[in-house]
């Protein structure tokens, strides 16, 4: 069992760090309810009956991986590029017009920027969606688009530490000086295995994987309001 810090220790903890890495969907943006159903909705629109365990099977996949799964296992008659274009069209309007930030997210990002912290976004979501929502909510003033790293562009997922180590190097820091904010249990684990300190941000999509969060999260918060 790794050290499990109390919440009141977090203020001191994040101030001691040089780099803050934020996941986007489910961490900064309240978008997971949409993503939980988009795969099912898409398959039905293509005349394919989704398997009952689809959401469970997709939870740790990138969009590219889910598309490859649909094509290979479920008989989707699309190329991967066509699938990605379809999904982004389905999600685009919600990112541009509807999806809200999670409570306290913008205030904490601004506070961290004022404290001089290096910051970036590391996300499984495609760049167009992330940039659209970030711009609408004013996040780009503190997290410019060149500080957005996506799993698709890097060719790596969050189930292993590699993508975190790569991002940390790109940001000019080291794991020991990095704090990662994630909501998904598989990503919390991947981040922790990289040697970073990890803060788990509550999201209902985390489901029943309490044991993973207990083992790998150094600190857990219900929302960023606890940090501002």
Image (cartoon, rainbow, N blue to C red):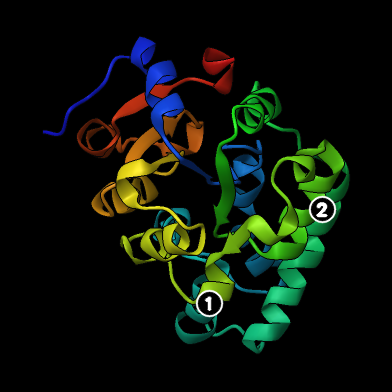
> Which one is in front, 210 or 159?
159
* Residue lying at 33% horizontally and 50% vertically, measured from the top left: 175
Residue 187 horizontal/vertical position (percent) = 38, 50
In the drawing, what numbered circle is on residue 214? none
Q: In which quadrant of the rendered view does residue 200 lie?
A: top left
Q: Secondary structure at mark 1?
A: helix
| Residue 97 versus residue 48 in the image, above or below | above
* Residue lying at 51% horizontally and 57% vertically, measured from the top left: 171
In the drawing, what numbered circle is on residue 132? 2
| Residue 140 versus residue 194 in the image, above or below | above
Crowd class of label 2 (few under 14; some 14 to 19; many from 20; radius 10 Å): some
Q: In which quadrant of the rendered view does residue 160 lie?
A: bottom left
* Image side of residue 34 versus residue 189, left or right: right
* Residue lying at 45% horizontally and 25% vertically, measured from the top left: 15
Residue of label 1: 70
Q: Please say whether residue 68 is visible from this viewpoint.
A: yes
> Which one is in front, 76 or 16?
16
| Residue 124 versus residue 1 in the image, above or below | below
Residue contact at pointers 2 and 1, CB within 8 angstroms: no
The CA span between labels 2 and 1 is: 26 Å
Question: Looking at this rendering, what residue extends furthest in the left direction?
Answer: 1
Q: Please say whether residue 94 is visible from this viewpoint.
A: no
């Amino acid at each position: 069992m790794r050290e499990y810090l109390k919440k009141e220790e977090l203020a001191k903890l994040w101030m001691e760090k040089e780099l803050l890495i934020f996941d986007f969907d489910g961490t900064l943006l309240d978008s997971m309810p949409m993503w939980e159903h988009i795969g099912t909705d898409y398959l039905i629109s293509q005349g394919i009956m989704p398997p009952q365990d689809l959401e469970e099977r997709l939870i740790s996949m990138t969009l590219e991986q889910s598309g490859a799964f649909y094509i290979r296992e479920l008989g989707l008659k699309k190329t991967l590029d066509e699938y990605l274009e379809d999904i982004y069209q389905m999600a685009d309007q919600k990112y541009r017009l509807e999806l809200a930030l999670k409570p306290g997210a913008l205030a904490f990002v601004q506070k961290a920027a004022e404290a001089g912290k290096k910051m970036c976004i590391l996300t499984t979501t495609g760049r167009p969606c992330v940039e659209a929502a970030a711009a609408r909510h004013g996040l780009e003033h503190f997290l410019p688009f060149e500080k957005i790293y996506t799993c698709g562009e890097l060719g790596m997922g969050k189930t292993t530490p590699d993508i975190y180590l790569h991002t940390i190097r790109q940001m000019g820091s080291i794991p020991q000086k990095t704090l990662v904010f994630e909501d998904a249990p598989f990503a919390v684990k991947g981040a922790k295995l990289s040697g970073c300190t990890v803060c788990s941000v509550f999201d209902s999509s985390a489901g029943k994987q309490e044991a993973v969060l207990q083992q790998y999260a150094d600190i857990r918060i219900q929302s960023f309001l606890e940090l501002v």
